[in-house]
Image (spheres, rainbow, N blue to C red):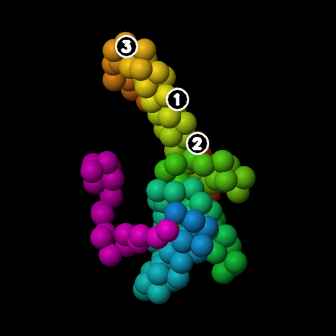
Amino acid sequence: EILEEAGLQIRPERTVWCSPTVDGGEQVVDVLLDSPQLPSAVISSNGAAAVGIFLRLQRDGRAIPEDMSIVSLDGQEITRVVGLTAVEGAFREQGEHAVADLLTVIRGGAVEPQDQAVRLIVRSSTGAAR
């Protein structure tokens, strides 16, 4: 919905599922390379898979972000190591709040829904749209 609101076309044939691993990300690139045209960007729901995409594209001589931008939606530490743009804060803060809420409930207290701080950390894996 957010991509469509931003005027970006959703192309189901470009949605590729993989295991949440570096190997899984590398396999995504196999699928992308078989298509007539590489997408200008990849959004990965998993940091390890995003790193796999990054490593495989580099091995194939592709420049990141000139040939393709890569964004990870989970901000795992591994994404920082290779300089991937990522959404950070969601999992860690959600986990911390969940544990705090659980302890409150165990102690007989009541909990209220909380907004989670999520931020986009732009690193070297993204560039201007082409």
The residue sitting at 47% across, 87% down in the picture is 34
Task: Give the residue pinned by disc 3.
Answer: 108
Classify mark 2: helix, strand or loop: strand
- Is 8 covered by the magenta stretch? yes
Q: Position of residue 48 (x, y in %)?
A: 59, 60
Location of residue 36 with respect to 3 vertically, above or below:
below
Q: Amino acid at mark 2?
A: Ile
As measured in the structure, the alpha-carbon distance from the residue carrying label 1 to the one carrying label 3 is 19 Å
As measured in the structure, the alpha-carbon distance from the residue carrying label 2 to the one carrying label 3 is 38 Å
Q: Earlier in the sequence, mark 1 or mark 2?
A: 1
Classify mark 1: helix, strand or loop: helix
- Front position in the image: 92 or 125: 92
Question: Magenta segment range?
Answer: 1-19
Location of residue 77 with respect to 61 vertically, above or below:
above
Q: Nearer the viewer, mark 2 or mark 3?
A: 3
Q: Position of residue 104 (x, y in %)?
A: 43, 17
Q: Quadrant of residue 108?
A: top left
Task: Give the residue pinned by disc 2.
Answer: 121
Classify mark 3: helix, strand or loop: loop
Location of residue 90 with respect to 129 vertically, above or below:
above
Q: Earlier in the sequence, mark 1 or mark 3?
A: 1
